[in-house]
Each structure stands twice: as structure tokens, then as C-alpha cells.
Image: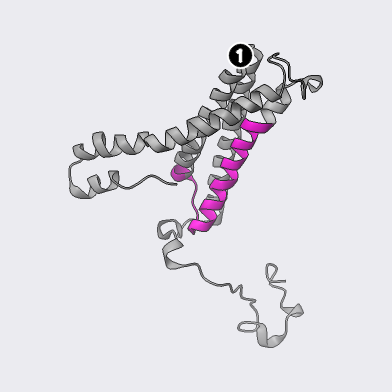
């Protein structure tokens, strides 16, 4: 009734100025409002969101193709799992960059939800779907040393995710580049302070 402004279904004392139904909700916290994006129209937000989501799907398809080609070239499970881990590390950075460039949100909650959906879909397809698709059904639970089996790549993925991802986060490569290379070369203190902010967690 609210979206169609159907005032006949609402009691008269709930109708604003006798011809409007108001949509009232609890406001966002002031710190979570993205003030620079509030002036964007719904149409522009929808178009930009569709562009970013289409890019994300294309990026996921590219990752799936890369993993598939690595597996089809009789790559050993460690090679496939390293490719998957590297794509799982780089993917969120690419999605974050494109999303910050194009997608507009009125509050931080919707921005984080959008980013979470894209990154979860990317990692889910990379780690589970592609590996399950390229594994022949008859070799799903076979534990022989054949590279077509499912369990050796899954074991290798678990191992590389346990080792490579924490090492990458501990070394903080991009944070160190910002602090030690880019930061000292900035022209003023404000720009330098931006380089010394910590990375996201």
C-alpha cells in the first residue's frame, strides 16, 4: 500500500495531508551515512550497481576459466591450489577498487553488504564450484595419486589457504609500500597521513 500510495486501505489519521502515505524508518547512524553519495539518483545507483555486478560476474568467469585451464593442463593439485589462493587474495582487492570507483551507496551498511555478496560469490565459485565441476564424477572420492581426483586438490587448497593467506596478511605488502615508499614522497602532511592509515581487516 505504501509503495502504491493506496490511501484507501489506510485509516485517515495515518495519511499525511490527506493524500500521502509516509515511509518512516529509524535513521542511520551519522557516522555510517555516506554524505558524498546522497545526491545520487536511484537510476544512477542502479545502473552503476548493475555495471559493477556485471564486471564481478565477468571477473568470476575469468577466474573460473583460469582455474579450469590450469587443471586441464594436468597441473598438480598444489599448482591449482596456489592459483586459487592467489585469485582469492587478489579478487577482493579488484572488487573493492571497482566498487569504490563506480558504485554509490547512501550508507556504509549497504556498501558492506554489497561488497560481502560479491566477495563471497567470488571465493565460493573459485574454491568450490570450479573444482567440483572440473573433477570427473567417478573420481570424486577416489584417493589415488591421479590429478583428476577431488580430494588431493581440496587438501592442497586447505593447506595453501592456511599458509599463504595469513602470511600475506602479516606481511601487509601494500601497507608497507604506502608507509615506506609512497608516504615519504607526498607533498604535505595530510596526504602523508592518508598513506599511514592501517589496512582493512
**Residue 129, position as x, y percentages in the image:** 69, 31
- Asked whether, in this view, residue 59 is left or right of residue 19, the answer is left
Give the extent of the magenta segment.
Answer: 100-128
Q: Quadrant of residue 21?
A: bottom right
Looking at the rendered image, the quarter that the N terminus falls into is bottom right
The residue at the point 40 percent across, 57 percent down is 36
**Residue 188, position as x, y percentages in the image:** 18, 46
Outermost residue toward the right in this view: 138
The residue at the point 80 percent across, 23 percent down is 137
Task: Look at the image and say whether residue 167 sits in the magenta stretch.
Answer: no
Outermost residue toward the top in this view: 73
The residue at the point 55 percent across, 72 percent down is 26
* Magenta stretch, overall SS: helix
The residue at the point 46 percent across, 67 percent down is 29
Q: Disc 1 designates what residue?
A: 75
Task: Look at the image and say whether residue 126 sits in the magenta stretch.
Answer: yes
| 157 versus 4 height, above or below | above
**Residue 52, position as x, y percentages in the image:** 54, 41
| 182 versus 4 height, above or below | above
Amino acid at each position: 500500500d505504501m509503495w502504491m500510495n493506496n490511501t484507501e486501505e489506510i485509516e485517515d489519521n495515518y495519511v499525511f495531508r490527506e493524500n500521502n502515505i509516509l515511509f518512516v524508518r529509524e535513521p542511520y547512524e551519522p557516522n555510517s551515512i555516506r554524505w558524498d553519495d546522497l545526491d545520487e539518483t536511484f537510476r544512477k545507483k542502479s545502473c552503476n550497481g548493475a555495471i559493477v555486478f556485471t564486471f564481478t560476474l565477468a571477473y568470476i568467469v575469468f577466474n573460473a576459466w583460469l582455474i579450469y585451464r590450469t587443471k586441464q593442463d594436468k597441473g598438480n593439485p598444489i599448482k591449482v591450489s596456489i592459483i586459487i589462493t592467489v585469485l582469492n587474495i587478489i579478487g577482493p582487492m579488484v572488487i573493492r577498487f571497482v566498487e569504490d570507483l563506480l558504485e554509490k551507496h547512501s550508507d556504509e551498511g549497504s556498501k558492506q553488504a554489497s561488497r560481502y555478496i560479491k566477495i563471497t560469490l567470488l571465493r565460493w565459485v573459485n574454491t568450490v564450484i570450479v573444482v567440483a565441476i572440473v573433477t570427473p564424477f567417478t573420481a570424486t572420492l577416489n584417493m589415488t595419486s591421479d590429478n583428476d581426483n577431488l580430494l588431493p586438490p581440496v587438501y592442497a587448497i586447505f593447506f595453501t589457504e592456511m599458509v599463504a593467506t595469513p602470511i600475506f596478511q602479516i606481511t601487509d605488502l601494500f601497507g608497507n609500500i604506502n608507509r615506506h615508499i609512497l608516504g615519504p614522497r607526498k607533498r604535505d602532511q595530510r596526504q602523508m597521513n592518508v598513506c599511514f592509515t592501517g589496512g582493512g581487516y
